[in-house]
Image (tube, rainbow, N blue to C red):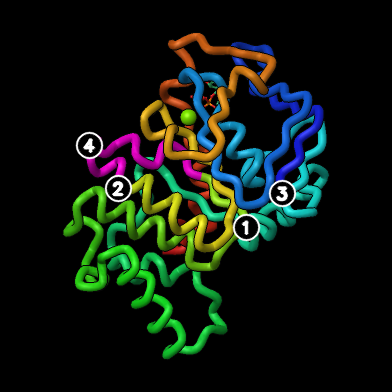
C-alpha cells in the first residue's frame, strides 16, 4: 500500500538546510494500522505531510496505492489527496461557523443527490453516536464529540489511506481511548490503511503495528527547542482539502 525508498526532506534553518527526513526503505501493507511513536521534533508530522502529498519531497520514491506520489506536481498531489487520503488533526479544524453536519458535507462530491447525502450523513453520525447533535455548531459539542465529527469528515469518502496526527493529543485519557478505538474501528470497516502519530504508549498498544520513528528515520533532529511550535502551513494545506479555506 505504501512504499518508501530513499526519501529525503529538508527545511531551511538559520541560513542552512537541515535534513529532517531520511528514510532508506519503509513499506506498509494495505489495511495495516500503524502507531507512529517518537520524540517531538523527530519529523513525524513532516512524514505524514509527505505521505499525504501536502509537502513535496526533495528526493526519493513514494508510492501509495500504486500511485507514484513522488514526481507529482502540486495540483496532482492535491488531486491524489482528495481521492486517496483522509486527515485527522489534533485540533480537529472544524469550521466554527458551520454545523458539524455541514462540516462533513463539505467533503462530499457535489454530484451526490440530496436524499443520498442525507442518508449517508445520518448513518455516519448515528454510527459515532452523534445523530442528535449533527445540526449543532462545533462549539456546542465536547472536544471528544468534535473529534468524532472530524473522524466522519476524514472517513466518509472511504479513503484508502488515513493519516492522524496526534488525534487524541488534546483529550483527557478516557475520551482519548474512546476516540482511538473509534478511529481504529472505522478504518478497519473501510479497510483503510491508518497511520497515527501518538505520544501515548498505552494507546499505541491498540495498534497492530507500532513503529518507533527513530528506527526508520536516519536523521534525528530532536532538539527539544525545535519541533514544538511548527509552522502549520502544511496543516493548513491538508485542511484546505477538507473545505476549511472555502468556508
Ligand atoms: N515548515 C517548516 N519549516 C522549517 N522547519 C520545519 C518546518 N516543519 C517542520 N520543521 C522542523 O522539522 C523538524 C521536525 O518537525 P515535525 O515533523 O513537526 O516533528 P514531530 O511531528 O515529530 O514533532 C523540527 O525541527 C521542525 O522545527
Ligand atoms: Mg508533530
Marks 3/1 in contact by CB < 8 Å: the verdict is yes
Up the image or down, 208 lies above or below 130; here it is: above
- Does residue 127 show up? yes
Tell which tag, 2 or 4, sits nearer the viewer.
Answer: 2
Disc 1 from disc 2: Cα separation:
23 Å
In percent of width and height, residue 59 lies at 80, 30
In percent of width and height, residue 23 lies at 73, 24
Disc 1 from disc 4: Cα separation:
29 Å
Classify mark 4: helix, strand or loop: loop
Classify mark 1: helix, strand or loop: loop
In percent of width and height, residue 230 lies at 47, 27
Q: Residue at x 48, y 15 (%)?
A: 226
- The mark that comes first in sequence, 3 or 2, is 3
- The mark that comes first in sequence, 1 or 4, is 1
Would you identify the image quadrant in which residue 95 lies?
bottom left
Q: Nearer the viewer, residue 203 or 133?
A: 203
Q: Which residue is mark 4?
A: 172
- Does residue 234 show up? no
Local packing at callout 2 (Cα closer than 10 Å; few below 14, some 14-19, many 20+) is some
Q: Which residue is mark 3?
A: 1
- The mark that comes first in sequence, 4 or 3, is 3
Q: Which residue is mark 2?
A: 178
Q: Which residue is mark 1?
A: 160
- The mark that comes first in sequence, 3 or 1, is 3
Magenta-highlighted residues: 164-177
Amino acid at each position: 500500500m505504501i512504499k518508501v525508498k530513499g526519501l529525503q526532506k529538508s527545511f531551511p534553518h538559520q541560513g542552512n538546510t537541515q535534513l529532517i527526513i531520511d528514510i532508506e526503505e519503509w513499506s506498509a501493507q494495505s489495511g495495516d494500522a500503524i502507531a507512529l511513536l517518537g520524540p517531538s521534533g523527530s519529523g513525524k508530522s513532516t512524514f505524514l505531510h509527505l505521505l499525504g502529498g501536502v509537502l513535496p519531497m526533495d528526493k526519493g520514491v513514494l508510492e501509495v496505492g500504486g500511485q507514484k506520489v513522488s514526481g507529482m506536481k502540486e495540483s496532482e498531489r492535491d488531486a491524489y489527496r482528495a481521492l486517496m487520503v483522509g486527515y485527522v488533526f489534533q485540533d480537529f479544524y472544524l469550521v466554527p461557523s458551520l454545523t458539524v453536519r455541514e462540516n462533513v458535507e463539505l467533503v462530499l462530491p457535489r454530484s451526490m443527490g440530496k436524499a443520498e447525502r442525507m442518508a449517508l450523513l445520518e448513518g455516519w453520525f448515528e454510527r459515532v453516536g452523534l445523530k442528535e447533535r449533527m445540526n449543532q455548531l462545533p462549539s456546542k459539542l465536547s472536544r471528544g464529540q468534535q473529534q468524532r465529527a472530524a473522524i466522519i469528515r476524514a472517513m466518509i469518502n472511504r479513503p484508502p489511506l488515513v493519516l492522524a496526527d496526534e488525534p487524541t493529543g488534546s483529550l483527557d485519557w478516557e475520551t482519548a481511548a474512546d476516540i482511538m478505538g473509534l478511529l481504529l474501528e472505522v478504518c478497519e470497516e473501510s479497510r483503510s490503511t491508518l497511520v497515527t502519530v501518538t505520544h501515548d504508549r498505552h494507546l499505541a498498544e491498540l495498534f497492530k503495528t507500532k513503529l518507533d520513528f527513530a528506527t526508520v528515520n536516519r536523521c534525528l533532529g530532536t532538539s527539544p527547542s525545535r519541533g514544538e511550535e511548527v509552522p502549520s502551513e502544511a496543516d493548513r494545506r491538508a485542511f484546505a482539502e477538507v473545505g476549511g479555506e472555502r468556508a
